[in-house]
Image (spheres, grey):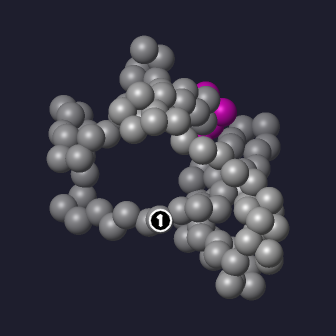
Amino acid sequence: MASRLLGIGLVTQGATEPGVRYPAVMEPRYTNYFQIGHNSCEIVIDCGCFYETDAAANIHTRVATTPRYAKALMETLERALHEYEAAYGVIAVTNCDEASEDRGA
């Protein structure tokens, strides 16, 4: 599994893995907004939150990695989403603009 070799794996709650250290307290950050950019050496992912009532997105985390690790992350996310959908059903994807129009916004 290429993504495992690159150090990216699926995490289950309370799971520990040899060779991986977690801080005693790790604060999760909810993210529903992403901006992704790149140059010849790296992929940069800005993560934040954006709601209809906000004037602008609030970026709280920036992840910078190599294209190789970004591809491994993409493959790991795809695998996680397939497992999620197998357990809980297909995820409905809607366009936020269409959803706003449906509500009369």
- Residue 57, by quadrant, is bottom right
Residue at figure coordinates x 45%, y 36% from the top left: 89
Give the x, y percent position of residue 68: 61, 28
Quadrant location, the N terminus: top left
Of residues 52 and 14, the one nearer the viewer is 52
Image check: 55 left or right of 82? right
Give the x, y percent position of residue 44: 67, 50
What element does badge 1 sit on?
loop
Give the x, y percent position of residue 75: 54, 27
- Residue 96, by quadrant, is bottom right
Dominant SS of magenta comes to helix
Image check: 17 left or right of 53? left
The stretch in magenta equals 65-69
Whether residue 71 is visible to the viewer of this picture, yes or no, is: yes
Of residues 66 and 53, the one nearer the viewer is 53
Q: For the residue carrying disc 1, how many other residues have a C-alpha within 10 Å: few (<14), some (14-19), or many (20+)?
A: few
Image check: 30 left or right of 102? left
Under mark 1, the amino acid is: Tyr
**Residue 72 on the magenta segment:** no
Image check: 4 left or right of 23? right
Q: Which residue is mark 1?
A: 30
Residue at figure coordinates x 80%, y 77% from the top left: 105
